[in-house]
Image (cartoon, rainbow, N blue to C red):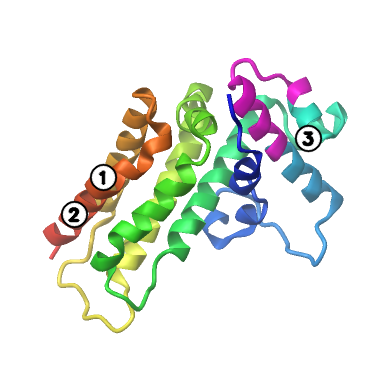
Amino acid sequence: MQINYGTVKYLVEFSALRSASMSDVTAPIAAPAAPAAGTEHRARLLEGMARAVAAKGYADTTIADIVREASVSRRTFYENFADKAECLTALYEAASGNAIAVLRAAIDPHSDWEAQVEQAMAAYFGVLARNPVLLRTLFIDILGLGPTGLAARRRANQQLADLMLDVVNNRPGERKRKTPLQPMMAMAVVGGINEMVLHSIEQDRAGQLQELVEPAATLLRAAISAEF
């Protein structure tokens, strides 16, 4: 199995934890010029977790695997996380936040949204597809954590829906929509896109998520059109 460690590091870039899009899923974190030791250790542990699950899968990953990949002590692990489930949740939130940040960066708020749909979706799916093994862990194993994992998924979905609502309903220089895109419709689109990704994972096509750009864009356009 070939593991793209550069991609793993990108997915868990700790700056994602500090972005505005992650503010509601993590405690507020200051952004000093140089990261504090605890912040650096947490970032290394998330990367270590990503490396371990990409190599072995979540079920077979141990605390020893994580700390070895992170080059920190077991004591440092427990200073940051109660167990590997909590570490996986933090990894999921960091990776999700980073993917959303990429999606946000791909959108020009001054250009026509509908013309940018494919570009935005391609950027989002591109990030998700860079490590198929890790993607499986983040999309499937996270739900095996019970209420905690489900809550993390809900928060990530809400961030995507909120971004969609902001981009569609509050575009600078455009006329106000007579009927703004509604929150439940935005969440329905997010749910549909997640199901497409899950289907690709189950079909062993997690590395080919660009196939989803057209159907995901069509789904979003249909939702937007229905709300006019």
Q: Quadrant of the N terminus?
A: top right
* Magenta stretch bounds: 47-65
In the rendered image, the vertical position of residue 206 relative to residue 93, given as above or below: above
Query: Circle 3 sits on which residue?
Result: 70
Residue at the spot of label 2: 223
Q: In the figure, residue 11 lies in which quadrant?
A: top right
How packed is label 3: few (under 14 Cα within 10 Å), some, or many (20 or more)? many
Q: Are marks 2 and 3 in contact (CB under 8 Å)?
A: no
Q: Is residue 49 left or right of residue 78?
A: left
Of residues 119 and 92, the one nearer the viewer is 119
Q: Earlier in the sequence, mark 3 or mark 1?
A: 3
Residue density around tag 2, few if under 14, some if 14–19, many if 20 or more, within 10 Å: some
Q: Which residue is mark 1?
A: 188
Q: Residue at x 29, y 54 (%)?
A: 183
Q: Residue at x 32, y 61 (%)?
A: 165
Secondary element type, mark 2: helix
* Lower position in the chain sequence, tag 2 or tag 1: 1
- Residue 108 in the image, given as x and y percentages of width and height: 39, 72
In-image side of 60 versus 105 (left or right): right
**Residue 196 quadrant:** top left
Residue 28 lies left or right of residue 179; in this view the side is right
Front tag of 2 and 3: 3
Q: Earlier in the sequence, mark 2 or mark 3?
A: 3
